[in-house]
Amino acid sequence: MALAPLLPLSLAPLLASVQEPIPAAFERGSTVEAEVPAPAPILPLPSGPQLAWHELEYYAFVHFNMNTFTDEEWGHGTESPNTFAPSELDCHQWVRVAKEAGMKAVILTAKHHDGFCLWPSDVTEHDVASSAWRDGQGDVLAELAEACRAEGLKLGLYLSPWDRAEPSYGDSDAYNQHFAAQLTEILTRYGPVFEVWFDGACGEGPNGKRQEYDWDLFERTVHQHQPDAVIFHGGRPDLRWIGNERGIAGETNWNPYRSAEYFVGTAERPSELNVGHEDGDAWIPGEADVSIRPGWYYHQSEDDRVKNLDQLLEIWYGSIGRGANLLLNFPVDRRGLVHEHDAAAVAGLRSAIDAILAEDLAAGRKATSEQTRGGDDGPFAASNVTDGDPATFWAARDEMTSGTIEIALGRPSPVDHVEIGEHLPLGQRIKRFSVQCRTVDGWTTVAQGTTVGGRRIVSFPAVMANRIRVVVEDARAAPTISHVAVHSGPPRLEIFADRTAFLDETEAYLSADRDGAAIHYTVDGSKPDRDSPRHEGGPIAIDRDTVLRAVAYEGDRRSLAVAEETFRRFDPASVRPPR
Ligand code: FUL
């Protein structure tokens, strides 16, 4: 498909607005401020809707449609509308689960590849109006829109271009008109829509129907009815797929992307989608989608295969922690509810994140930099990164492509997470950074990384530090940073052992990442807590089959995961000498 070079939407108003970032200090009227204009933006830049999207960070996907009732992932389009029959549909429950998890929006599969519409559509009979469910009066989109309004979450809609039920599919113009009519219905009847998700999948195969999508028409339709919405996929996308369905962005994650290459085999370019392009001409940030279970749709057989806390945390670090947005899917069940196991898992993730981010040791602390544009008394002072105001930011002098910010933390504290955020309205700049902590041994590098973007979270074994430095080692232009936060998460614990399969006896060591943590353990596989034996140091002798499990406490805070190791003893008599 030929693509016109992509420019960020409404670039002109944005360029105008970035000329006047109006940091708070400007209003005080010092002469220095008047002499220090804002840094020039570096292209490409995000559009207004894209900037608003970056702030959402974390939202729910809901796969709920015909497949829920047929135990399928891809339906056929031949299913009877009566098969869609939730027994206790409650969209308020979905939205409450999402909100309590810290999510800001919900995106629902209004129509999946089988073509069944969860709203009464005027242009097809393959919809809820033709179903016996609620005597054909049901409308899932209306119910979800109402629930989102009530709870203050945004609504997004997934509409599959590939449609296996619609007879006009494959007959280009007629189907394009049909699809645009459906888009118009869902974008005009349910209030504001923040994101429209066009799935790229098509399983027709080489001998199947072929449909040329009229992306221009679809985009015009979105822009006409929902000018603030961002489009996932499509001819000139606002957002890109992150290149895998594991929810993991690249270590390096550029928001810029080469627009002319976007459709050159999207499926064959997962690694580029994952990483983006440092020299990209268009702002097309990555959205990381992943299901909380193996499937996108509900299958009872997966009730006990919900991702555990370790897996969910890995996704959180790998997506939000690398500057991507996270779209976490709930396969809503046949009742029409988020299953209890899924709700508990996502609530557990929320508690873990809260525990990690509980306190920002840098908040309000003095920060300094020798490279500050206009000096640290000016509008781009280093202390802007700790003032809690996302609109103010530190900027280095024009000629710099590196720079260091140093923050005094006050008392020495255990530090194990640092968050950094660039000021995205002026473009993504940082190519390489490191984090240093001042410990009793002097300055130590605790983390290194490449891109930063809107939010980068680095995690490392705790060190006692009283100062930290964020070092920008290389950048596309003078770096900007709007936000640095420093955290001390719950203690972490590891089990070390020479051998986990042994003949007579072996030893295990337990080690927490900070002094003074109390370690408790069990050797019978039971869940350890404060009442379990306390580990007083030294090795634990193991002379039989053992499941060693341990947790660490620091005051009220407990390590997030239970450390676990399985030891297996072989009977010497059963071990044959080598021949
Ligand atoms: C894919 C689809 O084929 C899956 O069924 C699911 O909807 C996923 C989010 O996108 O392309």
Image (cartoon, rainbow, N blue to C red):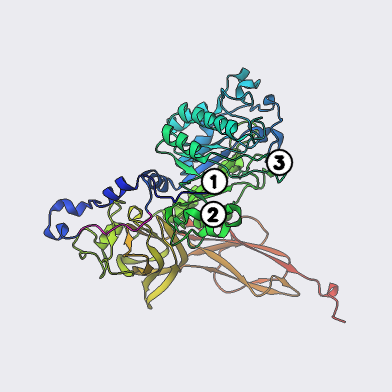
Instruction: Work out whether residue 152 can be spotted.
Output: no
Left or right, residue 78 beside residue 111: right
Residue located beneath label 3 in the image? 208
Answer whether labels 2 and 1 touch (C-beta < 8 Å).
Answer: yes
Give, as a three-letter code, the residue at label 2: Ile
Label 3: how many Cα within 10 Å (few below 14, some 14–19, many 20+):
few
Looking at the picture, how far across and down is residue 276, in whole percent?
A: 49, 58
Residue located beneath label 1 in the image? 328
Marks 2 and 1, how far apart at CA? 9 Å
Left or right, residue 495 beside residue 435: right
Question: For the residue with label 1, is its CB less than 8 Å from the closest atom of ligand 1?
Answer: no
Task: Name the residue at 73% across, 43% down.
Answer: 207
What stretch of residues is rendered in magenta? 37-44
Task: Name the residue at 65% across, 40% down.
Answer: 210
Instruction: Work out whether residue 406 can be spotted.
Output: yes
Give, as a three-letter code, the residue at label 1: Leu
